[in-house]
């Protein structure tokens, strides 16, 4: 039974109530404006270990901008972002990614003219030469890991194809494959399932839940309500730069005020 249909058959009371482990990433009173537009307006949010926190909200709510500030692609105007207690603001994006914070982009940003396999290899630690201690075993472990990621993302048969020649859904899975190779503690996923057909997003939900089962912590931006329901342990709701709610899915999604904002936007 796939993840979506098994969830369809559970009542709200049977759903696992998952609060998560320790706080890995803590955002405190964050502010960011572009000119007169407040895109992050006093946001405070904790991302806890071992769970999926889903960031929802209408287009332009400031979801991607929040990710950009966490990962060092944008500098906040004020506030704090702490990773396991350590301040992130002021660090470069590559320093933040080395600390174990990995992300995907809404526009994917793959290496279009590299093969699927090369796209995955670029995010892995450099290997040792085979004559160095552990070099030969390191190479074979890396090969096994790439093959495992290719298999689990359904890309084994496309390993030598260029990213630019993949179908849309395959490019989305390649973006997931790259983050799986990065060995990060937390994944920030910016609409990784948008535009997927139902078959593909069922595979996506299974993949994500299995990675979380292995200990990865996820914060994901997602619009599709079926997927939101299938993957979320907590939901944070942003609108016009403000965090309007942060709680268990049933509570947040049943709030009529938030539903009006969310579905008002969806039907626009
Ligand atoms: N670099 C920038 N300069 C000026 N305005 C920006 C910039 N980046 C984002 N914005 C604006 O900030 C607001 C929030 O954008 P953001 O991309 O964070 O929204 P979002 O919630 O991710 O939306 P979507 O669901 O459409 O991806 C939007 O009004 C956007 O036009
Ligand atoms: Mg966005």
Image (tube, rainbow, N blue to C red):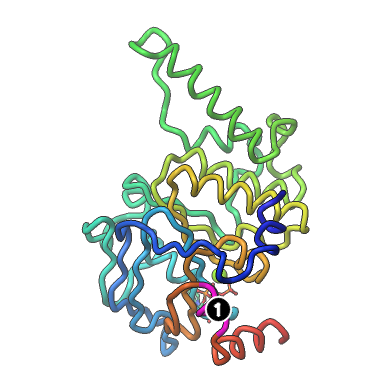
33 in the magenta segment: no
- The residue lying at 58 percent from left, 42 percent from top is 177
Whether the residue under disc 1 has CB within 8 Å of ligand 1: yes
- The residue lying at 29 percent from left, 78 percent from top is 29
According to the picture, the residue beneath numbered tag 1 turns out to be 57
* Position in image of residue 202 (x %, y %): 70, 53
- Secondary structure of the residue carrying tag 1 is loop
Q: Above or below — where is 41 with respect to 217?
A: below
User: Which SS does the magenta portion mostly show?
Assistant: helix
- The residue lying at 57 percent from left, 65 percent from top is 14
Q: Above or below — where is 243 with respect to 194?
A: below
- Span shown in magenta: 249-254
* Position in image of residue 39 (x %, y %): 44, 81
For this orientation, the residue located farthest to the top is: 131
Q: Is residue 149 left or right of residue 131?
A: right
Say which of 196 and 131 sits in front.
Answer: 196
Q: Is residue 164 left or right of residue 230?
A: right
- The residue lying at 58 percent from left, 38 percent from top is 119
In the rendered image, which quarter contains the C terminus?
bottom right
253 in the magenta segment: yes
* Position in image of residue 162 (x %, y %): 70, 37
Quarter assignment of residue 190: bottom right
* Position in image of residue 207 (x %, y %): 61, 46
Say which of 111 and 261 sits in front.
Answer: 261
């Amino acid at each position: 039974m796939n993840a979506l249909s098994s969830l369809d058959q559970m009542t709200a009371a049977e759903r696992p109530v998952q609060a998560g482990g320790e706080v890995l990433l803590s955002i405190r009173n964050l502010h960011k404006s572009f000119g007169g537009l407040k895109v992050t307006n006093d946001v405070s949010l904790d991302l806890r270990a071992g769970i999926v926190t889903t960031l929802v909200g209408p287009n332009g709510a400031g979801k991607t901008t929040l990710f950009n500030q966490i990962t060092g692609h944008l500098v906040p105007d004020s506030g704090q972002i702490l990773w396991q207690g350590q301040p992130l603001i002021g660090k470069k994006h590559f320093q933040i990614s080395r600390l174990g914070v990995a992300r995907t982009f809404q526009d994917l940003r793959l290496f279009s003219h590299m093969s699927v396999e090369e796209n995955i290899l670029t995010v892995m630690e450099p290997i040792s030469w085979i004559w160095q201690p552990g070099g030969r075993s390191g190479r074979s472990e890396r090969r096994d890991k790439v093959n495992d990621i290719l298999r689990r993302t359904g890309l084994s048969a496309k390993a030598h194809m260029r990213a630019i020649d993949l179908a849309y859904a395959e490019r989305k899975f390649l973006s997931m494959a790259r983050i799986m190779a990065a060995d990060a503690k937390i994944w920030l996923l910016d609409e990784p399932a948008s535009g997927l057909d139902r078959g593909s997003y069922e595979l996506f939900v299974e993949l994500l839940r299995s990675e979380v089962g292995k200990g990865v912590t996820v914060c994901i931006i997602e619009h599709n309500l079926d997927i939101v329901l299938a993957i979320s342990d907590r939901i944070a709701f942003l609108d016009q730069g403000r965090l309007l709610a942060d709680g268990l899915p049933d509570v947040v999604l049943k709030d009529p005020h938030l539903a009006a904002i969310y579905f008002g936007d969806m039907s626009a």
